[in-house]
């Protein structure tokens, strides 16, 4: 179904077009901004199962332009095909649309296998049918599990992930490789994200968890603003310097920019399929994130230490040298600035 958010611009004739699925979601919306800023015309597809239409207003405030939008489910081939038919001149698809709650995926695995896998199969079928040659896929560091050696490189073995959600990422990467091997004209890059946090510095877009947040930073900002009573820190007895778990927290705008670098590399036709780690190359503990939040915002956070959470790994961070050298991309925004951007966004959400 086409929603009436089409913005035509007579000067856009020579623009290269990209299709972004999940484009009103957290990472997708920041990526729409980066592609529009880089001069691409953007077609977004989202079924709004985990985002709201008003995100398009935020994108327009930042870029001056509302992307073309379809409220369409990527797991339903019939409606999806109409979008590909209309936009077969697109040079690439950036595929974010998926469910992402690890805990929910354990309880409802089929919901995840259906949405995340059928969605990709439909996207690939349409790309082959309408001859759109380049795909950037949202993968995750969950494909590495708890690696024996840190930091994690792209050569680190992919293991059976802990959750059905993580497994959909592993299976999707395999589906992409098999499809590329069977075709002459399909190329792809899988970006394996570490932990995206923060918001656009304008505070017009950011992470908008519907319900109780699954991730650390939205929980921190919601606690600080009074929506949650207390943050639970899951475990302080890990084998890490302060005992709390370590992750590689990557600024969402830095992450979004990596997709533009990936599409530009695909357009140069240098390789059929590649994977890249997208992180900062530095691990931060939960306590370090709490301290960074308190220092950069001046807010005191109410938190307590509780038992470890089942399924959480101890520590993981990325070796990003392949993305730095081959893609020419590098994380730039500091942890303090990123945490502050999440707080500014939380305050904006509270006001509205
Ligand atoms: P998000 O939930 O904010 O965005 C996903 C968007 O896809 C939402 O707007 C949702 O409405 C939409 N969507 C879901 N199923 C759909 C369907 N069948 N058809 C159309 N739209 C659909 O999530 P996000 O954090 O922006 O994540 C984007 C992608 O990055 C996902 O594939 C996720 O698995 C992956 N990823 C996220 C993280 C993270 O921590 N946020 C880490 C690694 C990988």
Image: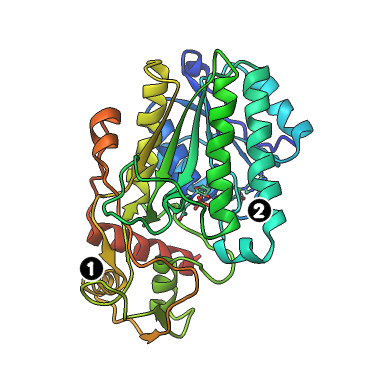
Left or right position of 44 against 76: left
Residue drawn at (33%, 52%) of the image: 250
Residue tagged by mark 1?
296
Q: Position of residue 263 (x, y in %)?
A: 42, 26
Residue at 70%, 42% (x, y): give it.
73
Which of the 4 image quadrants contains residue 248? bottom left
Q: Nearer the viewer, residue 256 or 142?
A: 142
User: Hey, which quadrant is residue 230 in on the image?
Assistant: bottom left
Local secondary structure at mark 1: helix
The answer for how far apart the CA atoms under marks 1 and 2 are is 37 Å
Q: Farthest residue toward the right? A: 78
Point out residue 277 in the picture as x, y percentages from the top left corner.
35, 42
Dot 1 and dot 2 residues touching (CB under 8 Å): no
Of labels 1 and 2, earlier in sequence is 2
Left of 308 or right of it: where is 164? Answer: right
In this picture, is 56 found above or below 243?
Answer: above
Q: Position of residue 275 (x, y in %)?
A: 40, 35
348 shown above or below 118? below
In this view, the residue in front, 22 or 102, is: 102
Residue displayed at 36% across by 23% down: 265
Name the colour scheme.
rainbow
**In the depicted structure, whether residue 76 falls above or below residue 50:** above
Is residue 22 visible from the viewing direction of this image? no
Q: Examine the image and state in which quarter residue 335 appears.
A: bottom left
Crowding at label 2, few (<14), some or many (≥20) Cα neighbours within 10 Å?
A: many
Labels 1, 2: front one: 2
**Pointer 1: residues within 10 angstroms few (<14), some, or many (20+)?**
some
Q: Secondary structure at mark 2?
A: helix
The residue identified by callout 2 is: 112
Give me the disc on residue 40.
none
């Amino acid at each position: 179904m086409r929603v009436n958010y089409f913005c035509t611009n007579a000067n856009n004739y020579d623009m290269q077009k990209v299709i972004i699925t999940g484009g009103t979601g957290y990472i997708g919306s920041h990526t729409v901004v980066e592609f529009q800023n880089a001069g691409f015309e953007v077609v977004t597809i989202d079924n709004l199962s985990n985002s709201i239409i008003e995100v398009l207003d935020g994108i327009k405030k930042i870029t001056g332009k509302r992307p073309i939008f379809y409220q369409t489910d990527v797991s339903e081939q019939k409606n999806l095909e109409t979008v590909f038919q209309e936009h077969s001149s697109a040079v690439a698809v950036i595929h974010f649309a998926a469910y992402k709650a690890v805990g929910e995926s354990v309880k409802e695995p089929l919901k995840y296998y259906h949405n995340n896998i059928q969605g990709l199969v439909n996207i690939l079928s349409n790309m082959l049918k309408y001859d759109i040659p380049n795909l950037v896929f949202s993968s995750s560091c969950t494909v590495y599990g708890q690696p024996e050696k840190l930091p994690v490189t792209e050569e680190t073995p992919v293991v059976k992930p802990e959750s059905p959600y993580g497994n959909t990422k592993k299976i999707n990467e395999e589906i992409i490789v098999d499809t590329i091997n069977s075709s002459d004209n399909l190329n792809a890059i899988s970006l394996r994200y570490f932990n995206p946090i923060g918001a656009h510095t304008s505070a017009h877009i950011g992470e908008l968890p519907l319900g109780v947040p699954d991730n650390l930073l939205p929980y921190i900002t919601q606690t600080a603003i009074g929506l949650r009573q207390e943050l639970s820190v899951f475990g302080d007895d890990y084998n890490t310097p302060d005992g709390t778990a370590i992750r590689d927290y990557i600024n969402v705008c830095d992450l979004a920019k990596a997709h533009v670098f990936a599409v530009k590399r695909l357009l140069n036709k240098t390789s059929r399929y590649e994977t890249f780690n997208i992180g900062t190359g530095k691990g931060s503990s939960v306590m370090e994130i709490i301290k960074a939040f308190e220092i950069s915002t001046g807010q005191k956070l109410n938190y307590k230490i509780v038992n470890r959470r089942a399924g959480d790994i101890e520590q993981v961070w990325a070796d990003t040298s392949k993305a730095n050298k081959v893609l020419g991309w590098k994380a730039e925004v500091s942890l303090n600035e990123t945490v502050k951007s999440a707080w500014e966004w939380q305050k904006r959400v509270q006001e509205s």
